Image: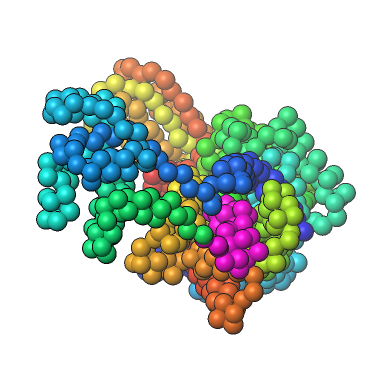
Amino acid sequence: MIQIQNLVKRYGSLLALDHLNLSIQEGEIFGLLGPNGSGKTTAINCLLALLKYDKGSVTIMGKPMKPDSYEIKREIGVVMQEVAVFDQMTVRENIDYFCGLYIREKSRRKKLVEEAIEFVGLEDYTKTRPGKLSGGLQRRLNIACGIVHRPKLIILDEPTVAVDPQSRNRILEGIQELNRQGSTIIYTSHYMEEVEQICSRIAIIDHGRVLASGTKEELKNMIKTGETITIEAVALEPEYLADIRGLSHVFDVSYKDQVLVIRCSKAKHNLVSVLNYLREKDIAFGKVFSELPTLNDVFLEITGKALRD
Amino acid sequence: MIVFNCFLRMIKRNCGILILYFSIFLTICISIQLMTNGKGMGNFEEERLNIAVIDQDGGTLAKELRAYLGQRHHLVKISDDPKTIQEELFYRNIYYVATIPADFEQRCLVQGEKLKTIRVPGTTSAFYVDQQINQFLNQVKVLKAAGYPDSEIYQKIEIIEQAQPDVALLDQNGHGGVKAPHVFMFQFMPYIVFSIICYVISYIMIEFRKKPVRRRMICSAMPPIRQNTQLFLGYLVLGIGVWALCMLLPVLLYGKDFLSDANKFLYMANVFALTLVSLAVSFTVGTVIRKPEIVSSVVNVLSLGMSFLCGVFVSMDVLGKGVQTAAQFLPFYWYEIVNEILAMHTNFTSEQWLEIGKGLGIQLLFAAAILCVGTMADQYMTKQ
């Protein structure tokens, strides 16, 4: 559905997009994951022809995307990072306005507006002005304005920033529902949990480049880490750390603030062998937990830094 | 027409400002009408002060001066004692004390010595008593020099003083030479038209020019040219609406008086030209300003500033030459120039027609220039 090839965008001397390549298929929820300033929003702006790029091409639904590609734009719903609504109009009027930018027919618009209000759960606030809504409700309104015209492609740029957990869950469920109804979705976020929860395919980007892409399983398989064991242990001697590092399948050990983090490659009984060692050496320990690799681990291993650094 | 409808909806939301300004304007106009209704413009009433005349001379001239002042003011008897005089002045029992010295005629009439006077500090009325005394003494001097005997001099002065000048105002505007009441309404109108349009459009423009909304609208399936055309239509509807309301006011308040004014269409054209200027300014203000909180201060500075400098609140005759020169660079000035000509004439000379055309033309040029600035600012902001 979308092909981005060798996209280059410079802001003066800053290279915001460095030969970015992406391919997004119809019907998927595609996640663009990266830290703040990694180029996610720039990529979206280039995709929507809001920004001129220096090199490369963007094709949507088989046609090149240009500022005047109104036929393509008709099929795209956009939910911006900032809430894009009129403060002087009510919730219903706002949704109707943004629907009217795509659909002229009044009766059809009325039906779509009602559906959008119901979809985001703003039935009780239709006559309220946006300024009187909570942050979460404003985000929901923002989404309603973006999806009201039933687009085939929906682009959501960090729609859950500064949203309470309840609203966030509602928004994420809504996005999955839109996908089930047939929309292709591009979702950008720096919250890996969200991306992991809803996206069928993910591209990790940093410094304007795609570092890795695939399903979450594919991404996790790309890295060495198979299991991360975290143990609360007091005053561990450096010799113990060296011993643990020497255990089979362990490839990284760190000890900070009385918390021991052990990264192991995929193998059976990693946790058991670590605990056995602690028992042998009579080392007291508190909480113990073991996790399968997350997207943060993927990002960490690829870039050498955590996603939220 | 979704953008246009949205614009109209926002105008409705800002109706409060419109009503508020019209109410203030109507109150001012009605007050002026009540103040000037049937009197005031052509009438004059002399003020009579409580004054004291201390006669140390006792001669005929002194007595006649005393009688002369007595006809024009209330004479209060007080003793020739500085303490008493001070006290009477302090309590405002009297406002003016004239002391006629001994050998008055010789000293004041022949030698030209000034009469000793004491007055309440800061009072302007006392100035007129000074003038009256000077006038009396001058008349005596002139009549004496002309050879009139003393017995006739004072009779002559009385006759001269009783004579009333017959003033006939040249009627060039169909209102007996004085300004018609609706002229004052048109004099104040720039403030109201400008303020309403600037407030309403600036608030709406800020909404439409918010970065996220603007980006969101560019992403939509409606070409920007169609969006802008609909916005432009919205501006025009607001402008014409405010103009029509402003034209309705003189009809409602002054009825026939305004409708029978031969210049009514020129008044309307003048306000329309000013409406276009206001639309252009409001477009620019709304483009440049991002925060609604700032609108009020900017619009106030512009509307009040131009109103005070260009003769909206005070007649242009009162303004200094420097102020008038500076005001030429402001559109209100040209509106008021046209308004002044329309107020005083119905049959125009070719020069007056030229002045009217110039005034209207310059206002339109102002509108075009400001609109260009606004458009450039808008394009710059869009690129940003």
Name the foreground residue: B150 vs B245. Answer: B150
Question: Can residue A126 be spotted in the picture?
Answer: yes
The residue located at (65%, 37%) in the rendering is A129
Name the foreground residue: B249 vs B255. Answer: B255
Name the residue furthest bottom: B350
| Left or right for B251, reference B201 | right
The residue located at (12%, 50%) in the rendering is B107
The span picked out in magenta is B167-193
Name the foreground residue: B157 vs B14. Answer: B157
Q: In which quarter of the image is the N terminus of chain B?
A: bottom right
Residue A209, image x, y percentages? 48, 61
The residue located at (61%, 61%) in the rendering is B176
Residue A221, image x, y percentages? 54, 48
Residue A282, image x, y percentages? 31, 17
Residue A210 falls inside the magenta stretch? no
Residue B46 sits in quarter: top left
Name the foreground residue: B299 vs A178. Answer: B299
Look at the picture and state if A134 lies above or below B62: above
Residue A251 sits in quarter: top left
| Left or right for A24, reference B299 | right
Look at the picture and state if A136 lies above or below A19: above
Residue B357, image x, y percentages? 59, 77
